[in-house]
Amino acid sequence: MGEFYSLTVNGRVREVQDAQMGESLLFVLRERLGLLGTKGACEQGECGSCSVMLDGELVCACLVLAVAQSGRDIVTIEGISPAGTATDVQQAFVDAGAVQCGFCTPGLVMAAHALLERTPTPSETEIREELSGNICRCTGYGRLLQAVSEVAVRRSQGGTRNG
Amino acid sequence: MAESSVISATREGRIGDSVIRPDGMEKVLGEFRFSSDLPMEGALWGATLRSVHPHARIVRLDVSPAWKIPGVVSVITADDVPGRKTYGLIRSDQPVFASDVVRYVGEPIAAVAADHPETCRKALAAIIVEYEVLPPLVDAERAIDGSHAPIHPDGNIFRHQRIVHGDQSVVGDVVVEGTYEMGMQDQAFLGLEAALAIPDPGGAGVELYVATQAMHEDLHQIAQCLALPEDKVRMILAGVGGAFGGREDLSLQVHTCLLALRTGRPVRVHYGREESFVGHIHRHPAKMWMRHHATRDGRLLRVEARFVLDGGAYASTSTAVLVNAVTHAQGPYRCDSALVDGWTVRTNNPPCGAMRGFGVVQACFAHEGQMDKLAAACGLSPVEIRLRNVMRTGDRLITGQVVENVAPVERLIRETDALPLPDEPIGGRDFDPMLLPGGAGLTADPSHIRRGIGWGVAIKNMMYSEGFDDYATARCTLADGVATLKFATAEVGQGFVTIAQQIARTLLGVDEVRLDRIDTSIGSAGSTSASRQTWMSGGAVDLACRRVRERLFEHVGRLWGVDPIRLAVEDISVVDTTDRSRSITVAEASQGQHFEETAEYHHPPTEPLDENGQGDCHTAFAFVAHRAVVDVDPELGLVKVVQIATAQDVGVALNPLSVVGQIEGGIAQGLGLAIMEELVIQDGRIRNASFTDYLLPTFLDMPPVLSTIIEEPDPRAPLGAKGVGEPPCISVTPAIAAAIRDAIGKDLTRVPVRPQDICL
């Protein structure tokens, strides 16, 4: 092989070496670029664990062909905030007890950010509906609802995304 | 230990505080490493070839074509298993690789190691397996009546257990009877099975990073199969993405180790979702019959029951699941007479074993259906019939065992009943079609929707039963004001790591509690199952910390020239309770010191059941009540759960935030079982092994949960705290089924309730 293509991930151009052409964005992010925060759990876009932003749009990385994303702006959980810092959503997840096993968490963090960008003051039903593409098997969603609601309130009172 | 040393928790992070998880920040940042997040230079990928038939003889197995594929490094079969060819938690009846007969669809036959998952896929496809298809045994009743030939040398019946208790001639003025059925539920943890095995030079041993519920249970089985001494198999808990019983049995552990030992290279095996569905055990599907006898005023006199649990192809924990089912047939109600027959049998269906609730989920669905029938027959409300029969501490179970635990069943029902019912009309106060049954499809006509209310109450045993000494081990070290805890307790998301720190902070008066790596270099903690780790590993951490505190008191006593019995930890200091002017911070007192203690916690012994199902077989019990409100569209058979109210007996809420998380999460799984989750099995094949077809509750499916935590410290529990993991998912399922019955007036006898059960 020896072929490569490049992807723009979290603001950096990354070369993908020796990849097989059929690899999903999820596989390439994890196995070729070492970005392990994006999780795979269903391989068919049903659970949202692999949610990333693609040109500002929330997508399931398991459904996206990696090689076709050259030139597009990809943001993963690792790029949602400066390294080692937490966004308001991430901090709220921790504080509200919205994390148990944590496998769905990165995907839900991405989805919650996308929701709050689109709908800054969502109703409870809007939160439930907009995040219904992300399966959480541990929490029953109650603490997640609390976390997202709190962030919406805080932002409406002048709180910022990055704390 | 002097009573004065029992401290009050005043600083954050102590017992009783809603402490956040120590791994929470890593998890939200995406930095926490799960078992699938362990890439390694030079590691190979492994994959498993599985049976495509529920029952067949392997006539020919030729792996040589796989070896010829570029990139393939190893191919292994049963012939390559150096030690014991089988494994199993209770009976070793499941082959590591099938060699002569396959007994379920998905049974492993061979495994490969290669440079890329795609190479693995090609290699598996190249392996030639010729089968002689045999008639599958898929009807559990045929295993019981003996009309199907044995499909395994051990026979088709895993266990028959009978309970005969009290006066067998009792006949009630009121008698109600019902049959109940439960489909096969899957744990559907999100973090798929994954492992990394790293061989020692020369194959002398192996290091295994894996997501599991039971480090030492795995270790015993793996070492036997690999023919290695246990100290040559070093297990490290990799991040666990949920478990719920589905990681109690081995899945990929032996295969991954064998491939690593064979190739001399690190090997990673990751299951996909479809493979996960066939690669782990499930909740037993059940068929149950019950007949309840009562007085005219609703006092329960006698329970008769018959259980048939389909255990699938291999034993797993079926025999223990059965005992839970039959011994919980009466529910949380007084009953002096019983006749129960239970079978768990071998079939060519997918193997079943542990899932949250473990046999009690099945029993509860049946006994709660019966209590509602009894209520109707006696002209009582569902609440009243239950209140008239509540079990109390000191009551005798149908096994003859006396309930010695706190048993606040009456209070649970009353507190649940006191929670407000939803005051929103159908569709919500602002009428949002998303809140109708069927949601966004706009399928339901609001004027046709009916609302119903239903109840469920449960008793659940905790810890292992029938004489098993499932002890737990923990080590505590105190040095320079920092405590360090070491245990092999599998943290699967439930939050034991959080409460372990809380215990140490509270007992030792330190703020910093480090957690050592979870691995098998310390004694067993048993499994993270049976709602047991708070009690068992919590008990071991508690004991280890208390012993360290004794050492600290001896040290300070020597410094001050006083009897250590006068000393206590208060907040962050050791104080002299006789002369309170004297105190020293723990940080200062432990400066330059190294106090280390390892403790094993054992629960009181239990005993096996006799042939009449009599014996003190269980360790302890917890209780819970649920009330469900549902909206039902009777034309399309769609259900929207509107609200769940619950009160749960927790003993002491060591971490109220964690308790709420367990309550809400358990309810979601019980809701799934009530109205959507079922592995559909046809002729031994799972027809819906994907998240597209196996429906899990989403954010929108979950209603608001109103919960009341009932704290009545249990004097038998090391911290007064009962396990909280399983009860939430047990009686919510019958409560939802009852609410649907209430809404539409139909006698629904099966969960999950399907649209056709409602509208046809």
Image: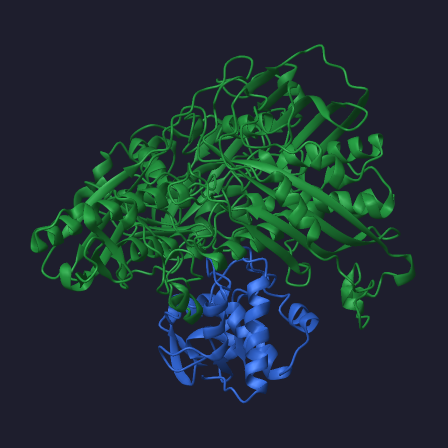
Chain colours: A blue, B green
In which quadrant will I find the N terminus of chain A?
bottom left
Residue A94, image x and y in percent?
A: 45, 68
User: Would you identify the image quadrant in which residue B231 lies?
Assistant: top left
Residue with the most extreme right position: B447
Residue A65 picture location, percent across and down: 53, 71
Measured along the vertical axis of the image, is residue B41 above or below residue B385? below
**Foreground residue among B196 and B716:** B716
What x and y, as percent, mark residue B167?
66, 12
Residue at screen point 84% across, 48% down: B743
**Quadrant of the image occupied by residue A141:** bottom right
- At a point 42% along the width and 85% down the height, the residue shown is A11
Residue at image location 45% in from the left, 28% down from the top? B465
Residue lying at the far top in this picture: please name it. B169
Percent position of residue A148, x then y: 57, 73
Location of residue B249 by image quarter: top left
Q: Nearer the viewer, residue B457 or B222?
A: B457
> Which corner quadrant holds the C terminus of chain A?
bottom left
| Foreground residue among B635 and B592 | B592
Is residue B200 visible in the rendered structure shown here? Answer: no
Q: Is residue B419 visible?
A: yes
* Residue in view at x 43 percent, y 30 percent: B95
Please state the total of marks drawn on the protein image.
Answer: 0
